[in-house]
Image (tube, rainbow, N blue to C red):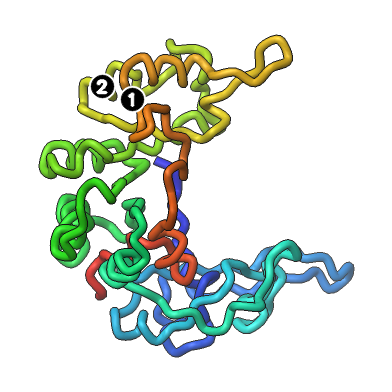
Amino acid sequence: MPPRAVRLHTTTNILTTPSGGEMLRPLQRGSIRPSTGAHTKPASAQCCTSDITLAEFKTLCGKMDASDPHATTAAEFLGGTPSFRTDLYATCGTLLTHAESIELFQGLSTKMTPELKAPEAPMPFNGFSQDDYRQKLIDEYKVAEVSPRDVYAQSFNLDDVRYWIEHEPHFDKQAVYLNDRFDPPSAQDPNDPTTWDPAIETLVADGVKIVAPPMWVLLTVKDGKIVPSKYAKAAKAAGLDDEDGAVTPQKKNITATHEHLCKQSCCKFSRCLLPAG
């Protein structure tokens, strides 16, 4: 499992609020070598939604996801927006819970692609287990009477996808396994089936219908042309596909995402599902 970004400290103003002192890892200021002026240690911080209450979460302002590694104050840390982005619209964005984002997307008549992020808090969290977490994501769509056809629940954790397949048959056909196991330093090769873990056959046996590796895993170069990789061909041959009948690269079929809206202004959307401590 790859580390999961927990970014209230880079996507909200939490460091400059009273809640900033309650963070998992409060601001550690950057260090400078006096003799040269060189930065010797980057500024850092970490905050999860599990560090604060829902009421505190709702008081925060969303901002562009950025931080200044050279910061020596909380206000400076909130800067660092890359030059290719803009803070023009970073005017205290409204943070949403997962249920609130569903309501918004229903009004926009869009499909939804929630990603269940790996929790940073040890599970169970205040009695809230990983299975509770998996189920809560689906339950909030059912409460809102969202058609399963409009939901592509996804996770990098294959056990999350297996849970939905076993316990939520109406949502299983569009449950997406986000396969990032090819990422370095992994030795897995998209063009060498003997290195694949899990194997395509394992995914099929588990009932997985959609696999979503990074785009580069699905492509390779042959005779100077971009062609499907062996992984892409094997996945398609095994029937792993999306609604349109093609293997799904990450973020394909997305018209709006919970990750973008709920957690562009937060730390990554699914942490909104954890009960506030």
Q: In what quadrant of the picture does the N terminus appear?
A: top left
* Front tag of 1 and 2: 1
Q: How far, Cα to Cα, is label 1 from label 2? A: 8 Å
Residue type, mark 1 in image: Leu
Q: Is residue 223 above or below residue 76?
A: above
Looking at marks 1 and 2 on the same chain, the residue that comes earlier in the sequence is marked by 2
Q: Position of residue 62 (x, y in %)?
A: 49, 77
Residue shown at 21%/26% (left/top)?
A: 206
Q: Please give the residue where the numbered disc 2 appears in the rendered image.
A: 204
Q: Viewer-proximal residue, 188 or 209?
A: 209
Dot 1 crowding, Cα within 10 Å, few <14, some 14–19, many 20+: many
Find the residue positioned furthest to the right.
Answer: 36
Q: Please give the residue where the numbered disc 1 appears in the rendered image.
A: 240
Q: Viewer-proximal residue, 183 or 116?
A: 116
Secondary element at image label 1: loop
Q: Position of residue 139 (x, y in %)?
A: 15, 58
Q: Viewer-proximal residue, 84 or 46?
A: 84
Residue shown at 47%/35% (left/top)?
A: 249
Res. 52 image quadrant? bottom left
Q: In what quadrant of the picture does the C terminus appear?
A: bottom left
Res. 86 image quadrant? bottom right
Q: Position of residue 213 (x, y in %)?
A: 46, 33
Secondary element at image label 2: helix
Residue shown at 35%/84% (left/top)?
A: 56
Q: Viewer-proximal residue, 192 or 207?
A: 207
Do callouts 1 and 2 mark residues in contact (Cβ within 8 Å)? yes
Q: Is residue 58 above or below residue 177?
A: below
Residue 50 visible in rendering: no
Question: Residue 119: which numbered mark, if any?
Answer: none
Res. 195 image quadrant? top left
Q: Is residue 264 above or below residue 21?
A: above
Residue 112 is left or right of residue 141, and the answer is right
